[in-house]
Image (spheres, grey):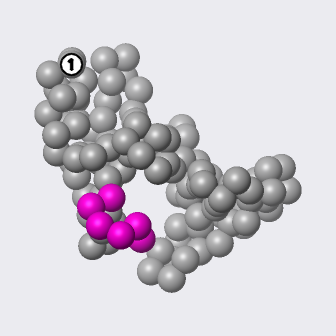
């Protein structure tokens, strides 16, 4: 993946098993929990490139969220504010090699940011 690529999509659901069956049957996604990410079933599309995860639906997280890869989350967050957006969730580490954050664009859309700072997790 490269800067600007959509790298991950999270889909809020109420039932992980039912959602896994639905998306697996519809798109051929193999939805599995990975070691260290229990309670966060992830999928990889048949193209082997795009993927995402299923997240617990909450009042604050009720629409799918795409994540765009950036070279530096911190630099992107500064630019977001300069361009009239705002920070949703500040930079949070995923593991030693990656991190995420969210932004709110001027129209109120929440978009995720993803950064890889070392070997891909």
In the rendered image, residue 50, in percent from the top left (x then y), is placed at 59, 51
> Which picture quadrant has residue 22?
bottom right
Q: Is residue 50 magenta?
A: no
The answer to whether residue 41 is left or right of residue 58 is right
Classified by dominant secondary structure, the portion drawn in magenta counts as loop
Residue at 29% in and 67% down: 118
The answer to whether residue 72 is left or right of residue 120 is left
Q: Which residues are magenta?
A: 116-121
Using the rendered image of the protein, determine whether residue 14 is visible from the camera's viewpoint: no
Q: Is residue 119 magenta?
A: yes
* Secondary-structure class at tag 1: loop
Residue at 79% in and 50% down: 27
**Is 19 in front, or is 51?**
51
| Mark 1, other Cα within 10 Å: few <14 / some 14–19 / many ≥20 | few
Which quadrant of the figure contains the C terminus? bottom left
Residue at 51% in and 50% down: 8
Above or below: residue 41 compared with residue 57 = below
**Is 11 in front, or is 51?**
51
Residue that sits furthest to the right in the current view:
25
For the image, the number of numbered tags is 1
> Which picture quadrant has residue 41?
bottom right
In the rendered image, residue 59, in percent from the top left (x then y), is placed at 46, 43
**Is 55 in front, or is 34?**
34
> Which picture quadrant has residue 111?
top left
Above or below: residue 43 compared with residue 77 = below
Using the rendered image of the protein, determine whether residue 43 is visible from the camera's viewpoint: yes
State the residue position of label 1.
83
Residue that sits furthest to the bottom in the current view:
35
In the rendered image, residue 44, in percent from the top left (x then y), is placed at 64, 60
């Amino acid at each position: 993946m490269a800067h600007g690529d959509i790298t991950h999509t999270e889909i809020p659901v109420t039932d992980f098993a039912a959602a896994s069956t639905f998306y697996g049957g519809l798109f051929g996604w193999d939805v599995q929990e990975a070691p260290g990410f229990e309670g966060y079933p992830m999928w990889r599309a048949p193209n082997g490139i795009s993927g995402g995860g299923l997240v617990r639906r909450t009042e604050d997280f009720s629409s799918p969220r795409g994540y765009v890869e950036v070279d530096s989350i911190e630099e992107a967050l500064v630019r977001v504010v300069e361009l009239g957006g705002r920070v949703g969730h500040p930079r949070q580490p995923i593991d030693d090699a990656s991190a995420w954050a969210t932004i709110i664009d001027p129209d109120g859309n929440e978009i995720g940011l993803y950064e890889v700072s070392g070997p891909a997790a």
